[in-house]
Structure formats: C-alpha cells, structure tokens
Image (cartoon, coloured by chain):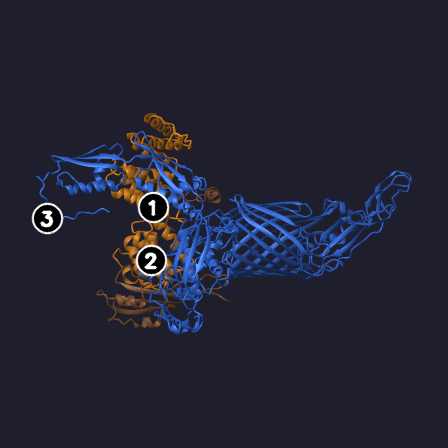
Amino acid sequence: QQVVAVEEPGAAEPTVSQQAIIRQIAVAGAQRLEAQTILSYVKMRPGDVYTEAAADSALKELYATELFSDVKIREEGGNVVIQVVENPIINRIILEGNKKLKEDKILPEIKLAPRQIYTRSKVRADVNRIIELYKRQGRFAATVEPKAVTLDQNRVDIVFEIKEGPKSKVRQINIIGNEHFSDGDLRGEMLTKQTSTLSFLKGGTSYDPDKLAFDQQKLRQFYLTEGYADFRVVSAIAELTPDKKDFIITYVVEEGDRYKFGDVSVDSEIRDFDSEGLTKTLVMKKGDWYNAEMVENTIEGLSETIGAFGYAFAEVDPQYERNKDDLTMGVKFRIGSAPRVYVESIDINGNTLTQDKVIRREFRLTEGDAFNSLQVKRSTNRIKSLGYFQENFEVAQEQGSAPDRVKLIANVEEKATGELQLSAGFSSLESFILQGSIQQRNFRGRGQTVGLSLNYSRYSKAAQISFTEPYMFDTSISFGADIYRRDYNSFNYFNSDRNNTYQNTTTGFSLRAGTPLSEYMTLIARYSLNLEDVTLGNQYFRDTDADGDLECDPLVAGRYLCDALGKRTSSIVGTSLIYDSLNNRVRPTRGERLVGNLDFAGLGGNVHYARARANAAKYWPVLNGFVLSMQAEGGYIKSLKSRGIDGTDDVRLTDRFFLGEPDFRGFDIRGVGPRVVRTRLTADEDGNFTVASKDNQTDDALGGRMYYKGRAELEIPLGSGAREMGLRPSIFADIGAVWGLKDPNVTSIANPLYLQRVDANGDPLAAPIYTNNPIAPDGETSNTLYISPFTEEYLGDTPKPRLAVGVGISWNSPFGPLRLDFSKALLKEEGDDIKSFSFNVGTQF
Amino acid sequence: CAGGSKVKDTAYVARDVESLYFAAKERLDNGQVKQAAALFDEVERQHPYSPWARRAQLMSAFSYYAARDYGQAIGAAQRFLSIHPGNKDAPYASYLIALSYYEQVSDVERDQQTTALARTALTDVVRRYPESAYAADAKLKLDLVNDHLAGKEMTVGRFYEKTGKWLAATMRFRKVVDDYQTTSHTAEALFRLTETYLALGIPEEAKKAAAVLGANYPGSEWYEKAYELMEKKAPGAMGVNLGGTKPTTMG
Amino acid sequence: CTSITDRRGYVADPVLTGAITPGLDNRESVRGTLGQPSFTSQFGDPVYYYVASTTEQRVFGQPQIEVHQVIKVAFDPSGTVNSVTFAGKDDVRDINPDGDKTPTLGRHRGFLQDLFGNIGAVGAAGAAPVGGPNGS
C-alpha cells in the first residue's frame, strides 16, 4: 500500500546538509519509453527541493506504472539521475501439459498477450485464472508453473507449465444430527453428489469447496421451508480419503423445533395499497406450518403487484417475530414508502439492421407513462416473439436522472432472420419429396416478412410470393398479400410404379388485413380469388359413348375423378378471430393460442361453400424444463349449391379436408380418411380372374367434409451441453380423423376388356374396338389387354380416431434446423397409408 | 526450453528491423493494406525497443483504418497512446480513433452507440490537442455527429407523434431543444413542440415555442408552418405580438 | 365493438391535487405531494405540467385521447405557487403531424445491402468497436 507522507506545510525541514535544489533531471536506461513520458509519471520538477521523501514517492510512482522492473534515483549536486530498467515485452505465450483443458479454453482467460509488457503481478494473476479453470473442473491438485524465457532485445517468452493432477471425487456424504429427515432426502437437496456407478451420467460428483458452501445454504433453505426456523449447520468438514484420491464430507446439523406461522400481515406505507386488503390476499394463515419458501414467493408476488402500479423501486421486507415458547413465527410484510416511478426514456441498442421503430412499437408502455412491471414483461415477450433477437432477451431497467425516474433499455443482439428451408422426406411409398423456400422475416430491418417459396416434390410444384407488414404506415393495422401458383398432381401406385392420377393447378392471390381488438385478441379480414383447373392424364380418356370425342372413362379413372374435372373460379371472403397469449411465438413455453376461421366461397365465381375451421394450442412449463403442449383442430365444410351429380359429393375434391404427413405424423401424405381402393384381379391357373393380391392395389384419397385432429407433445430438456447445441427431443401423440362424404358408387368389372385392332379378315381397323374376348375375330391375332378386372371398395369414411405415437428430435444443426420423427400408428382404419420416418432440414442465412 | 516450443509461428521469421519495416511500407504504398498492417505488427513484436517500433505501431493503426478494419485500427491506436502518451504523433493517433468510430456511424433508424463513441473521441481530440492540425476537422465532424444524434431524437419523436403518444413526443423534442441547440434540427423541434403542445391541450406553451422559433429562425419554413398551425388551431392565441408581420422580439 | 384503452402519462390523484394551495406551497412541497412534473415550461416564467390521459383505440383505428387532464402549477418568481389551473379534453386539438423532415447524414443502407446485409456476420457494417477509448 502506498503510504503518502503528508508533510505539514511549514514544518521544520529535516536538517539535511544544505537544501539541494534540483537543477535538472535526467533519465538513463530507457530504451522503449521516451524520457519525457517517464518524467510525466513523476512529480519531481527542476527547482523543487530534493528530499528523501520526494525521491521515495517518485520511486513508488514509477513502480506503480508497472513499466519498470528496477528503478534507482541518484542525486549529486542538484542534478538527479533516474536509472530505469524497463520490463521486458512478451513475445509469445506457450501452454504445456494441458491435456484435459484445451488451449482455446485457456487462452481467452489469460490477460497477458504478445506485445504487452511483462509484469510479475500480471503473470501471477493469470496463473490463478488457470488454476480457477481447473478447480471448476474438479481438479484441485492442478499446479501451474510460469517460466519466463528471456530473448534478445529485452523480450521474453512466457511458458505456463501445467500439471493437471487427478480429478478429486466426493466418495461419501454423511450427515449427523438429522432426526426428522433421512440422509437420502437431504442428499437429494444438495448439488454435490456421491460417486456411484451411475455418476458418469449425473456429473456433479467432483469436490468443489464453493459447492460445499452452496450445499450448506441449500440444506438451510430446505429446513426453513419445512418450518425449522432454528436450523443450524454446526460444522461441515471435507477429509481426504486415506488413498488421498477422493473426499468424504461430513455435516453436523442441529434441526431445532418446527415452527408455525404466528400472525401475518401486510403493512404498506404507500397510499395506494390498503394494508387490510393485501393481508387478506396472503397465502399463509396463522397456525399453518412455517414455510420460508412461501414467504419468499409472497414477497415476490407483492413486489410484482406494487410494480404493476408504478412503484418500481419500492421494497417489500419481511419482519419476523420469533416466539420461542409457543414456537410461532409472526411475519409482517412491510412495504417501504417509495415514490411512484415514471419512465424517463426507452433506449434501444444493438440494432444494426432492425429499425428502431420495429422494436419501439412493441413496447406496451412509453416514455412519460407510470412504470408497470406487467407491461414491461409483456413488452419483453412481444419483442422476443419477433424472432429477430437473442433467446435470453430482457428489457433492462436503470435508475433514471431522479429517484422517481426509470430508464428502460433494450439491448438486442440480432440473429439471422433469413431462412432457406430445404426439406426431404421418405414416405412409406418411397416417394422422395424435396421442398425449398426462402423467407426473410425482417426484410430491410423494417419488420416486414417477405417470402418466396418454391416447393418441388414428386407430387406437387408450388411457387408463392408473400409479403406481410404488421404495422401499415405505422398504424396498428397489419396487411398481407400472397400471389401463388400451385400444381398438385395426385398419384397412386400400381405394383410399385407410380402413375399420376389428376393434376390440379391453382393460380390466385389473397389479401388480408388485421387489427388488434385487445392486448391478446386480433381480428383478420381476408379475401382470396383462386382459378382452378383439374385435368387428367390422357390415358384415362376414351370415347365411351362412341360420339367421336374422348370422355373421361370412369372404368379407368374412377367415377369420382371424372366428376372432379374442369375449370372453376372460387372467390372466397373470410374472417378470423385470434386470441394469442403465447410468451414466445417462435418457441412457446407458456400461454395459449385460439383461432376461429369462417370462410364463404361464392362472392362470384362458380364455387359455393361455407367452411369453418378452429384450432387451439396450450403450452405449460412442467417440472423443471419440460414443456407440455396440447393442440386441437377441427373443420367443417358445407356446400351451398348442390352439383346435382349422384354418387358425388357437392363439395369439390380439391376443397375437402385431407389429413396426413406432415401435420399428422405416422401417416403418409393424405394417408387418413375416405378413399377408393381398387384391387386388380389376376388370372389363376385356369384363366379366370379371381386372385386378388394385396400388392397390386391402388388407393386414391377423396378427403372429407369434416375432420378433427389433436396432438399432445412433451418437450424433454437435456443437460446444458445438449441445450447449447439446440437439441430438443420430444415425445408426441397425434390423433384425428377425416370423414363425411356422400358414398361414391364404386364400379367393379368381372372380366377383362381387350382392344381389338383388326377386323374379321385381319386388316387393321381405323379405331380400336373394345371387346371382352381375348382373340380378334380373324381367329389368330390376340387383342391387347386394356383393363384387367378389378373390384373397388370405399374405405376410411369413419370418424373413428386414428392414433400414432412417436419420438422426434429437432436440432439447430450448424447448417440449420433439422427435424427427425419416428412414429408408429397404433390405431388405423383399413385403407390408411402409414409412414414411419420423415426428416426435414433447413438452413438459415 | 523455449527452443523446443511446439508453437510453429510462421511469422516468427527474425528479420532485421529496417527490411521488415520497409517491406510493410512498400505493401502499404501499393495498396495491400491488410498485409501491411500485419507486417507493421511484426516489426513491433520482433523489435519492440527499436525506434522503428513506435513508428510501426502508428503505421499499423493507419493500415487497419485504410483496410476499413476499424476495430483493429482503434485497438492499435490506443496501444500506441497508452505507451507514448506524450509523443508528437499522439494527436494523430487519437484523431485516427475518432475517424474509425466516425466511419461506422449508421443511419438514424439504427443503433447510435457508435455515434456516441465517435462524439467522445472527437471531443477528446478537440480538448486535448486544440492547436493540432486535426482539431479543426474534428470540430467539424463533431457538429455533424451532434446533428446526427439530434436526428435520431427527432426520428423517435416523430414516431411517437404518428402513433398518438404526444407526451412522449414532447419529451423527445424538448431534449433536442435543450441538448442539441446548435444543430440543424432545432427549428423543426420547436415546430414539433408547437404541434405536440396543441395536441396535449396546452396552447400557451405552443405559443411560446412558436414565438421562440419565430425569434431565432424568422425566415424558416418551420416558422411559417408553426404560424399557420397556431392560427388554425388556436386562433387569437398568437394574439398581439405576432399579428400581421413577424416581429423578431421574444414572444 | 371493444376498443383498447391505454393510460398514458401522469397518474393523477384528485385528493393530492386538491391539497396544493396557492401562496402556501412552493416547488419542493409540490414536488413532495405530486412528485416530479411530466415537464416544466422551457421558456418564460416557470410552470409545472402534469399530463394524464387515457386513449381509446377502436377496431382498425388509431389511439384517440378520450379522457385528458393537464394540471398546471404556476409559480411566481419567488417560487411560491400562484395558481393551479387545469386543462381538459376540450383543450386538446386534433393534430396531423407535418410530413416534412430535416435531412440527416450517416450511411443510408442501400436496398441490396438491406436485403443481403446480414448474410455473413450479422450487422457486419457496424461491427461492434473493440474496446472503446477508455478500454486499454
């Protein structure tokens, strides 16, 4: 410590021979630093009186700069010479002997770096930092030996020789003096665990003195929660085992007696809160067992309530009256008087891309308003729901320029909001699906979402451009528009070769506008115009009624497909009511979201239906870290104008509900719901067609007019290591059904149909004739088989629930979010297509 | 034991200081600023005590600045200042720091922390080295930075106005009038105060703001707008002193 | 149908406001009872303004002031209160903010830079400065 010699002004000078007045000061030995820089550090100036004390303080000042390893001051006849030896410069830092802790873990912790000045204190500080790193790993025997290797030009290399030593474990924890609770219960409360066979899984078995202190606190907290107010840890000793490898920890505790609550009350010095009213709201009653945790929660609850009324800095402190005779503990919650606090300013930092207003408009309170802790929490959730910033974002509070002023600070760290999504899936019919979409959720930092999605998969090609602006011209009205072109070709399989059934191309646009009804409720109005065209492959066309032009042949295509053909325009107006109180829309852990949609098609166009859909989702944080979510969905569509074709439902095929992958895991694309299954018969040995085999069946999903779907999913938290990698496994159960269709009349033909190309005397015919006999009338040429006999069944039109359970894992892999799902269909109806595995990978940019 | 060091340090080619320095200088001259900066660092690392080292530190800071690597430029310049605070090139080093921040100023819609850092650095230059060649330019840039910070306050104030948060808007515009009087935004701030005070139902303060605007910026278009607004929204409130002509006396 | 009501600015308490008596109270006593004002007059003689308002926002609408109160506490030069007056909703004027703005400098982000600006390091342009002037 630098002791500054204080000299009384005018005190008698110690009698030195004769006052030597400093005539000039010279610096010797400085190579790197300039003379006047060194002089600037010292208080001595030519003309002062040279005294021992002045020289002494100059020495101290020079050493304090840590620039010099040695300083000498000489004075002869008035001229002073400061002889310095500068500290060497560090050339390189080398770590040796670090096996368990790699270099990239140690180097960031070290303050010394090349080109810095070498000082013994800095080296010692770094040695402690390295030892601290090893302590945290439980290696208490680790030693670090710093060595300085001098080089030319007064430079030095620093070598840290590290001996890591064994990892010291806690072999046993014994507790003495506990009657009311078993050793096992108490050990459960502690952070440090005993080494056991399973310890490699749990970790925490390494000995660490800080953890020992923390465990004592946990013990105290446990007993206080159980009402033992007099609990005391008499002693806690850790001894080395005889073989010096591990430790045995022994706690001696004194439980004392169990207390009950005395009288409990709230005493508020703030006018706005009446004490009696608040006392009634208290959870604990006189006579209950005393519980310290309940007291803690009450304090938190009270501070939150008064925070909601503007008293951000008011304190709630409990005053205990302990009564040893009747073992009661009275608690008075005193709310200290504090001024109501107002928001002085809202500052937003870190937004290098996002515009200031995109964040500012999410604040539920603004400058000049009274502070309100609920609104601040709500603002934090809304900003987090934008999905542009770091996971652990919080609005920070800082004391303002006056005791009753607070500053709200939003320090954001932006993350990539552009998403390039590529997904591939295998379905039980081995069809490979590739989808790609580019979306930028924070377009030009204005909070707008711009999406261009190009889906190419074996069964559908779609291009869509979408744009959403949540706050049109800074008003509270949100606006969205999409333009899309979707080609969907349905397919079925006939003994493992795929043939297209129908193509449905839709081109259209949709506009939507939304406005908030309340903090959590939004109303959306929608209009969309779709031009649809359903066409069939020409192999399904035949001149069935011999009028010269080709029509759709129900025998080949199936009655339901022929009715679906043709062009139509549907002009749909719709509205939705959304209630959303999720705490984070991107990764919700709490809250619920309910949506009701109503759509009418028929404002012009030739499609008339009314469709109602609703979905609801609720999320709970369960135990610590688990997130349980329950989702339910349902829909009903009713045609408003009958199409007057018997055997076909009035609702068009493309407007009906379908259920399957990807939203109903465990089943294939459109794998659930009403379908027509056509089984082709093959000839048995004596030529007639009776054999029906399972593998040459084709099924075409028809969808349904009503559907419901439910899902329960439990997200399982992993250790911190896995969470860092973004691994989130979950187990799920999906349940649902699609049904309600006017039964299509199925057709079956018993004997095969042939194409006869030659007339009775063998000359080729202009147009093939369809006949049932296999040989042409000329007796030799055989006709080609056109359709083999088949039977059709209509299956799956039942509300009976299909159920699939499975496990899935989503992982924020380095190249983007990856989702793997393994599922097993438990309940399924005849005809449903199941699928056991799908994965989907996307990259973020 | 330094001999057997495992760390293979390619740049550890011990070359005498002049050739290293001139190699760096040459790189700098023909535009390879990144390599130049690295080589200047080498000079300082291998020959910390040579007179070249001091020069090299400064040159590496400049090269990083030229290579737009502002973080490194600031770091190098600060290292120079911490070791040679009294050096004759110290003004240039702190000016380099100020410039590095100044270059990173982003537009008013975004984070202004860098602008605030630029302001402190520029004020340092003007305060510590008033007679240096850089003080004049630093003063000029200081005004621009202040103008920019005022611009940010105005943007937030206008946002509050547009979304009907009149009290919040008033507080922001008052901040511009109080803290940024010498910037180009003061006139508009006074006009905006006329708007917000009227919207808050305090016409007398609106009148004062308009009067001060008229007194200090008589010819500005903001004053005309304020005058018309007062006539329309609080007829007669402007009353006597601002009648037909626009006198320049205080309201 | 429903509309969103928000409470902006000062939380007025009629009992406290009534307690301010001209001629007796001075700045400290007003500050003690009513707390710090929303703002004080910038020019001319000192006046404390406490602005309290409640806004309503109807469907597809913008927040409009429904209930409004401004408490004005004027002081004479010696610092004692000489008048306590109020302004209400009828003093509020409907203002449509002027569209012009004073130009600002700073690099405006170009269209393309916005679009692909943060593909590499997020916010590469405004890289956080390494160790501000005070950090060594």
**Is the residue marked by circle 2 packed among few (<14), some (14-19), or many (20+) residues within 10 Å?**
some
Mark 2 element type: loop
Q: Chain under label 2?
A: A
Q: Is residue A220 left or right of residue A555?
A: left
Q: Nearer the viewer, mark 1 or mark 3?
A: 3
Tag 2: residue type? Gly
**Is the residue marked by circle 1 packed among few (<14), some (14-19), or many (20+) residues within 10 Å?**
many
Asked if labels 3 and 2 touch by Cβ distance under 8 angstroms, the answer is no
Quick check: do tags 1 and 3 share a chain? no
What's the mark number on residue A11?
A: 3
Q: Is residue A652 above or below residue A415?
A: below
Asked if labels 3 and 1 touch by Cβ distance under 8 angstroms, the answer is no
Where does label 2 land, which residue? A400
Task: Give me the C-alpha separation between circle 2 and circle 3.
Answer: 49 Å
Among the chains pictured, the one given blue colouring is: A
Ranked by sequence position, the earlier of labels 2 and 3 is: 3
Q: Chain under label 1?
A: B
- Nearer to the camera, A51 or A687: A51
Where does label 1 land, which residue? B117
In the rendered image, residue A700, in percent from the top left (x then y), is placed at 72, 52
Among the chains pictured, the one given brown colouring is: C
Q: Is residue B87 above or below residue A788?
A: above
Q: Chain under label 3?
A: A
For the question of whether residue C106 can be seen, the reply is no
Among the chains pictured, the one given orange colouring is: B
Task: Give me the C-alpha separation between circle 2 and circle 1.
Answer: 21 Å
